[in-house]
Amino acid sequence: MPRHVAIIMDGNGRWAKQRGLPRTFGHNSGARQVRAIIEHCADLGVGHVTLFAFSSENWKRPADEVSSLMSLFMLYLEKEIRDMNLNGVRLKVVGDLSRFDARLQKLIADAQIQTASNTRITLTVAANYGGRWDMVEAVRLWQAAHPGQSALALTEEDLTPHLSMADAPDPDLLIRTGGESRISNFLLWQMAYAELYFTDVLWPDFSTQEMDRALAWYADKDRRFGAVTQRVAS
Ligand code: IPE
Ligand code: IPE
Ligand code: MG
């Protein structure tokens, strides 16, 4: 089993379009899919799932789509926190949250506090997240923690604690639904050695069976990390 699965949940808009529905219906449907996937991963012993919910580039979408995504995120937080606590799910949110409205920021902060002691699985939601932003932010945070120190001697180990995902192992498996084979500025630093799984299945159709298919694909990989063979499957 991968310790950490990262997912680019893509294809909501096309899923809706195929049905002659507005894009927001696709987002609603996609959001409903999340719980089953998280539960399934928790049952299988995957410790961390990280979901790309909103990229730093998604502000380029029409204002009404952006605002309905924000409402959906708020609704999700309000609705799911109780069950997350019942199911041992720890919620974290990464990204530049400063651009969200105060009410959403408060909901996020509360949700993180309320689920902080859950240990079965950590669900990290990347919201207004960009991999490049994460790296630049890490340098800024490092500098703030080491005033007067020159970055000339900076090492990877110096920066790691200041990256968004500092508390999680690097993703072993990246899944992107929706048929595109690109990273779209997701966890650039952390995915250096992730296995990349691309599927045409649209996110609202990504079932637990599809998840099993991705995990079986992953289990068959040789992960060498630049060295010699180290089998994933035991
Ligand atoms: C992914 O689905 C959800 C977000 C980016 C928020 P899309 O909305 O990108 O769906 P497609 O790619 O247009 O089908
Ligand atoms: C990636 O999907 C971002 C999220 C899933 C949140 P996009 O639909 O925004 O990516 P592009 O535009 O196809 O690269
Ligand atoms: Mg898309």
Image: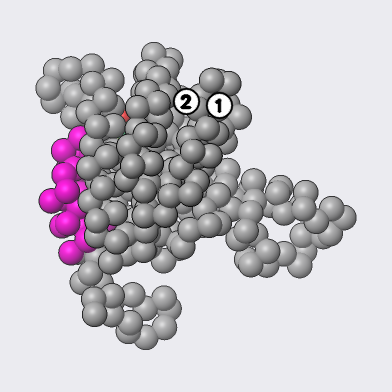
- Horizontal and vertical percent for residue 38? 29, 47
Q: Give the range drawn in magenta.
A: 195-216
- Which numbered dot is residue 59? 2
Left or right position of 18 against 132: left
Q: Which of marks 1 and 2 is in front?
A: 1
Furthest toward the bottom, the residue is 228
- Horizontal and vertical percent for residue 24? 28, 20
**32 or 110: nearer the eye?**
110
Task: Give amino acid for label 2.
Answer: Trp
Q: Which of marks 1 and 2 is nearer the N terminus?
A: 2
Classify 10 Å Cα crowding around label 1: few (below 14), some (14-19), many (20 and above): few
Residue at screen point 22% across, 28% down: 29
201 magenta-colored: yes
- Horizontal and vertical percent for residue 223? 33, 75
Classify 10 Å Cα crowding around label 2: few (below 14), some (14-19), many (20 and above): few
Furthest toward the top, the residue is 64
Numbered disc 2: secondary structure: helix
Residue at screen point 45% across, 61% down: 170
The C terminus - image quarter? bottom left
37 magenta-colored: no
Left or right position of 98 against 183: right
Query: Eyeballing the image, is 229 above or below 44?
Result: below
- Which numbered dot is residue 106? 1
Task: Give amino acid for label 1.
Answer: Lys
* Quarter where residue 180 is shown: top left
Left or right position of 116 against 144: left
Furthest toward the right, the residue is 148
Left or right position of 36 against 174: left
Tell me, yes or no, if residue 182 can be seen here: no
